[in-house]
Every structure is written in structure tokens, then in C-alpha cells.
Amino acid sequence: MNPIDLYLQEVCEISQKLDRAIIEKLVEQLVQVRARKGRLFLLGVGGSAANASHAVNDFRKIAGIECYAPTDNVSELTARTNDEGWPTVFSAWLEISQLSDRDALFIFSVGGGNLEKNISPNLVEAVKLAKNRGAAVLGIVGRDGGYTAKVGDAVVIVPTVSPDRITPHSEAFQAVVWHLLVSHPKISQAQTKWESATAKS
């Protein structure tokens, strides 16, 4: 099969296999965070960090949820990595932010964190802190979801339809799902520019 057709066929297959019930749980969790005036902290590394930065904009501007991505603060991120080590960069950041039971973590990750394999230990430490503080743990992750899916309150696992394209599909569907969330009528509070411009024309 043509590689373009194959990739897009896989996208369609993943879309059909996404767990709608878990996405609905994500919606309800986010509604609750906003209602109790909690904050949403989006965590990701690599491409997922870039997704987290974009999603912060959408959750703040469209959904009206106070929201932050620690990776947007590159000075603190690199200082903590240099001085204290990579595994605690997120948990230390969240401690200074006084993470509480009103708040939620939202993890964007391909693997979801795995201490045994030393994969994204910083996400694992952040999730552990969140569980200790009573904060909700949400996520959009790939493969088996790792530690995030194991202990999270509402975690969407992007189905694996090709072992050769786990990462691109996982990171792409982070964007698909978070855009679904901020567009959901229970969450959306502000119309985006192009839709409002079209409505007026």
C-alpha cells in the first residue's frame, strides 16, 4: 500500500478505536477542576512538551481553566536538570507551585513513564506527588500507558495499530483529543477566532 494511504488508514483506525467512555471521564474531570477553581498542569517531554505548550493556550483561552506547562519555563527546567537531575524536574516545580487536591496533572506521553526501564522518570515522580497530594491525574498516552495509565484517574490510551509508528500516532492524537476536549460543549467557553468570524459573515 502507498505509505500515505497506509498512514491515513491507520489514523482512521485509531479514531475508531479510541475509548469514548474514557474521553467522557476526561471531560468530567476537567469540568470539576474548573468548578473548584483548580489549576491544570500539563507535563510532557520531547514532542509532547511542545503539545503541552500549545494545549495550555487552548485550555486557558477556550476553556477558561488556569493552566501551566513547566517546560515553558526553560530557565527553571534547565537549572533544575543541571543542579538536581532530570527525574525531579517536574515534581520539584509542582512542589513550589503548591500542588493541591483542587488541581490536576495532565500527562502527554508516548510511554506514560516507567521507572524500571528508566523511561520518563520525571513524569513518574510528578504523578506520585499528585497522588500523594490528592490531585487528579489525567493523560493521553500511547502503548500500554505505563505508570500514568496504571494509577491515573482518566487516561486515554492511543491504540497501537502499527509498531513502526507508535510515537507519531501517540503525539498526533494528543492534539486530536485535547482539541476535542476544548471544543466539547461542557468545556468550551469561548469561540475561536475563525469560527466567530465565519458566524458573523
Image: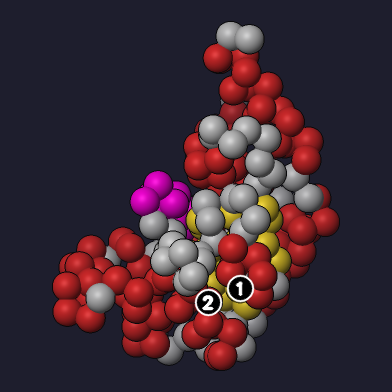
Q: Is residue 52 above or below residue 40?
A: above
51 is within the stretch colored magenta = yes
Alpha-carbon neighbours of circle 1 within 10 Å: few (<14), some, or many (≥20)?
many
* Distance CA(mark 1)–CA(mark 2): 7 Å
Q: Is residue 91 left or right of residue 106?
A: left
Q: Which amino acid, mark 2?
A: Val
Query: Dividing the image into 4 quarters, which one contains the C terminus?
Result: top right
Q: Is residue 97 left or right of residue 22?
A: left
Q: Which residue is mark 2?
A: 127
Outermost residue toward the front in this view = 116
Quadrant of residue 170 in the image?
A: top right
Residue 9 pos. (x, y %): 68, 22
Q: Is residue 83 above or below residue 58?
A: below
Q: Is residue 6 left or right of residue 40?
A: right
Viewer-side residue, 139 vs 104: 139
Any part of residue 131 in sight: yes
Viewer-side residue, 175 vs 60: 175
